[in-house]
Amino acid sequence: MAIATNLGFPRIGEKRELKTLLERFWKGQIDESALRDQSEELQRRHWQWQIEAGIEHLPVGDFSLYDHVLDWVVRVGGIPTRYAGLDGLAQYFAMARGTQGEDSISAMEMTKWFDTNYHYIVPEWTEDQEFTPNFAEFLEEVKRAQEIGSQPRPVILGPVSLLRLGKARGGDFDPLTLLDRLLPVYESLLKELQAIGVAWIQLDEPCLVLDLDEPAQAAIRTSTERLAAATSGLKIVLGTYFGDLRENLPLAMSLPVAAVHLDLVRAPGQLTEALPLVQVGQLLSLGLVDGRNVWRTDLSAALGLAEQAVDALGADRLLIGPSCSLLHSPVDLTAETSIDPEIYPWLAFARQKLEEIERLTQAINQGRASVADCLQENAEILARRKASTRTTNREVRERLSHVTTEMTVRQLPYAQRTVEQRDKLSLPLFPTTTIGSFPQTAEVRRQRALFRQGKLGETEYQAFLERETEACIRLQEDIGLDVLVHGEFERNDMVEFFGERLEGFLVSENGWVQSYGSRCVKPPIIFGDVTRPTPMTVPFTRLAQSLTEKPVKGMLTGPVTILCWSFVRDDQPRSETCRQIALAIRDEVLELEAAGIGLIQIDEPAIREGLPLRKVDHADYLAWAVESFRLSACGVADATQIHTHMCYSEFHDILSAIADLDADVISIETSRSQMELLDAFVDFNYPNEIGPGVYDIHSPRVPTTEEMVTLLEKAAQVIPTERLWVNPDCGLKTRDWPEVEASLRRMVEAAGNLRGVVVSV
Ligand code: GLN
Ligand code: ZN
């Protein structure tokens, strides 16, 4: 019999319970035991749901209080020495978030998990790195799952992926050289798991979908062989996801593991290649249900793949599951009450995906006839979606077919545009600005909630937002910033806001997915062709500009980011959807310009994460991504300054594409990596203006003026001063006013100090 499995479940909770718990704990409102008890209760509920849905191999250990990569750093004893003075949760959260106060410690870096919008904490490896096992909590978790009568399948982040996901500190060495030292720790874990009666483990080596050089491939082989040898009784399912194994497929299929999991949603074609490579007695785990999107599975098509595997191997040798962990899916569609009834049946969230896995498994084990009604209903839903008029808008398609190259280039090159912009804006050297958002206080959120619940009238809410905007303008003037923003008080989220205003999108009520730690996002769902019925940002931007003599920067989210941070329709290429969004943003840009806004920022923080995981696929993506950005930006006059902003990604490998965006100014996060990124910009000789973030906005810590001066001096050594901007790493929405005000005052002071130095030179 095929076995129904899962690879991981969302941790955050249907109502974001984990977020609430964490935030209460950080504020000192609950103690550690309450945090632990209540998060265990949450885990138990999630296990229960999976068991009830018929999942036989229950993923355990995938839960985390902040991040699973950080958990593995702790479990293998890879804690950076600067946290050595702390222990327990204080140490754990210090690594994730840094600490405040006199002996403040900076947080570890964060970056995106493969091509998802989930951020993991980047392990820091030193050449003399030692490892020590620290598995007590992990084992407790497994035992708790055993107590409720399930068959827990512990999820283990494999040693090669763990090392590779980290970065080498204090020296140029390959983290994989640490493998020999790391493996004994994993071996000890596997022995302990076997000792407590675990039958299966899920050993995730997602790095198998990346381009691996020979040493990395060899590391996968050595490590998997050693782990398999350490515990002959334990069955390993080797987890791969987010893509195609390509040249790594023969390697993965030749390892001594009980099963290999393949993502057949992203890469259905690899099934045919994999089947002949399945070893005698080995099982194959089929990732048939999309863990990364919200569409109902085409059950018949999925069964087609499964049946191909049944023919080759027999049902007994199959595991059926999602393409990847369901971490990236919202929790429960049935919690939605206001989704358009025509579109609702097209959707499936994590709990519905579990049902799909169960149905597929049943169809394989008992034949299609045993789930005939369900298959029939599924086919009808898919047919209705396909035929729906809600997905097509002729006008947009027509307009898109007439896009010309001229629409994607500015009139003059940067060197000439900048002269016009300088004349028009007359900014000082080291102009100071922010990335857009100001604190989304409890009060802002409360008013929004009241408005949404219909308890606050439109006029009152509008008046409230206008007061906030005005206060924000006044404060920015008082602080002495050079380029102001309106503050984004009317926005819940930089993508959802646009999703609510664009046609072709729908926004769920509870469709949250974890972004990092306690932070969640609610990606809008793009189901149809995109249009902009009315201006989206013009009124608040215009208002802000009317309140001040200083220039106000308009604030938009770019087409690639809207695409990447939405659940995207799966019935047309992503590039097509992106271009549609670009046209809508272009209209908004032009309307801002017409309203007298001289600087417009089009945020593209997600451009890097949209990059395909394999190098050979990069050029194609970058071409349409860059073209979409330019389509959105290039309609303006040369004197209008286009900004863009990026953060929390490895930008090194796409610098030439970033330059191709041809934004006049880019603000970019750098402080978490101590301006390392800047070196890359310098090596590349970035041609336009840059604002390297001078302080980390993810930490409540107020930076000192001196440290920002130091960072700016570092930047000024490598970037011509007339092209250098001064700004924080990212938007300030998650911070509180007192720290924002204090930080920005010091930032302005730091810029002032530099102006003094430069003038006196
Ligand atoms: N303008 C947005 C803000 O300030 C940018 C956020 C982001 O880069 N993620 O919040
Ligand atoms: Zn940012």
Image (cartoon, helix red, strand yellow):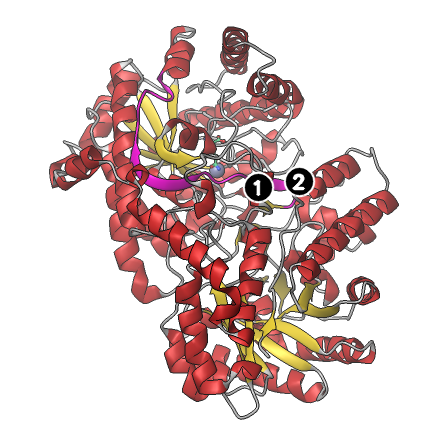
Q: How far apart, in angstroms, are the residues tagged by discs 1 and 2?
A: 8 Å
Q: Is residue 200 left or right of residue 687?
A: right
Mark 1 or mark 2: whose residue is earlier in sequence: 2
Q: Secondary structure at mark 2?
A: loop
Magenta highlight on residue 527: yes
Q: Does label 1 point to a residue whose CB lies under 8 Å from ligand 1?
A: no
Which of the numbered marks, if any, corresponds to residue 512?
A: 1
Q: Which residues are magenta?
A: 517-538
- Mark 2: give few (<14), some (14-19) or many (20+) Cα within 10 Å: some
Residue 687 image point, x, y percent = 28, 42
Residue at 52% x, 56% y: name it. 113
Q: Is residue 585 left or right of residue 735?
A: left
Under mark 1, the amino acid is Trp
Which of the numbered marks, if any, corresponds to residue 16?
A: 2
In the image, residue 102 above or below residue 514: above
Q: Is residue 609 left or right of residue 282?
A: left
Quadrant position of the N terminus in the picture: bottom right
Under mark 2, the amino acid is Arg
In the image, residue 711 above or below residue 133: above
Quadrant position of the C terminus in the picture: top left
Q: In this orientation, which residue lies closer to the viewer: 395 or 169?
A: 395
Q: In this orientation, which residue lies closer to the viewer: 73 or 285?
A: 285
Q: Secondary structure at mark 1?
A: loop
The quadrant holding residue 97 is top right
Residue 449 can be seen, yes or no: yes
Residue 20 image point, x, y percent = 72, 37
Q: Residue furthest bottom?
A: 280
The quadrant holding residue 127 is bottom right
- Please report contact status of discs 1 and 2: CB closer than 8 Å, yes or no: yes
Residue 8 image point, x, y percent = 62, 60
